[in-house]
Image: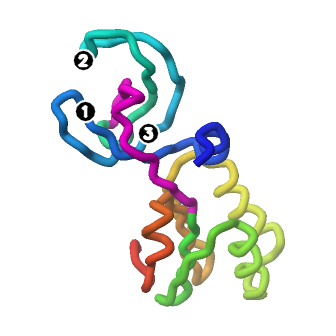
């Protein structure tokens, strides 16, 4: 994975990490910087990743060499219409679905799309008419293995 492209495209990264106690966990982080130095958990200077840790809801520094592997993530949009739902990968599909329904004006559709485009949060829900649309960040592998509509 090209890390620089990942940082530009997604704002959030997910990785498996082994902390100083040896405990391995998945971390979801909004990265802020990569820096060289040490902190209270390291004895020597080394490369670190500083960012907002969504798991701990706090700013954390991660020792770069303790990142076991990066996990690909994807932004998806879950569309539910009268209790039936499916997932799409981009806003063009959301626009197409709303436009094809002939239930909404262009202005109403643009307002919904604008809400999703202007929000930097990972999860967002918008209801319009009989539609419920949710934006979610999830692991790419989970999306590829999604066999039925889940998450509402």
Give me the C-alpha separation between circle 1 and circle 3.
15 Å
Residue 93 percent location from the top left of the image: 71, 75
Say which mark, if any, is on residue 19: 1
Q: Which residues are magenta?
A: 57-75
- Label 2: how many Cα within 10 Å (few below 14, some 14–19, many 20+): few
Question: Which residue is painted at 40% across and 77% down in the image?
Answer: 150
Disc 2: which residue: 41
Residue 145 found in image quarter? bottom left
Say which mark, if any, is on residue 29: 3
Q: Mark 1 vs mark 3: which is more N-terminal?
A: 1
- Label 1: how many Cα within 10 Å (few below 14, some 14–19, many 20+): some
Mark 3 element type: strand
Question: Which residue is painted at 51% across and 84% down in the image?
Answer: 85
User: In which quadrant of the rendered image does the C terminus lie?
Assistant: bottom left
Residue 69 percent location from the top left of the image: 41, 46
Give me the C-alpha separation between circle 2 and circle 1.
9 Å
Say which mark, if any, is on residue 56: none
Mark 2 element type: loop
Residue 54 found in image quarter? top left
Residue 110 appears left or right of 9: right
Q: Specify the principal SS of the magenta part.
A: strand
Mark 1 element type: loop
Q: Does the CB distance between marks 2 and 1 fall below 8 Å?
A: yes
Q: Mark 2 vs mark 1: which is more N-terminal?
A: 1
């Amino acid at each position: 994975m090209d890390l620089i492209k990942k940082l530009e495209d997604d704002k959030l990264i997910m990785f498996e990490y082994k902390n100083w106690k040896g405990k391995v966990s998945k971390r979801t982080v909004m990265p802020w910087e990569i820096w060289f130095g040490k902190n209270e958990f390291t004895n020597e200077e080394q490369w670190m990743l500083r960012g907002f840790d969504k798991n701990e809801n706090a700013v954390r520094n991660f020792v770069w060499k303790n990142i076991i592997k990066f996990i690909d993530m994807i932004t998806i949009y879950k569309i539910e219409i009268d209790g039936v739902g499916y997932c799409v990968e981009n806003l063009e599909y959301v626009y197409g679905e709303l436009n094809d329904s002939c239930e909404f004006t262009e202005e109403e559709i643009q307002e919904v799309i604008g809400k999703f485009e202007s929000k930097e949060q990972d999860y967002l829900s918008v209801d319009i008419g009989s539609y419920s649309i949710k934006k979610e960040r999830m692991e790419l592998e989970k999306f590829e293995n999604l066999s039925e509509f889940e998450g509402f």
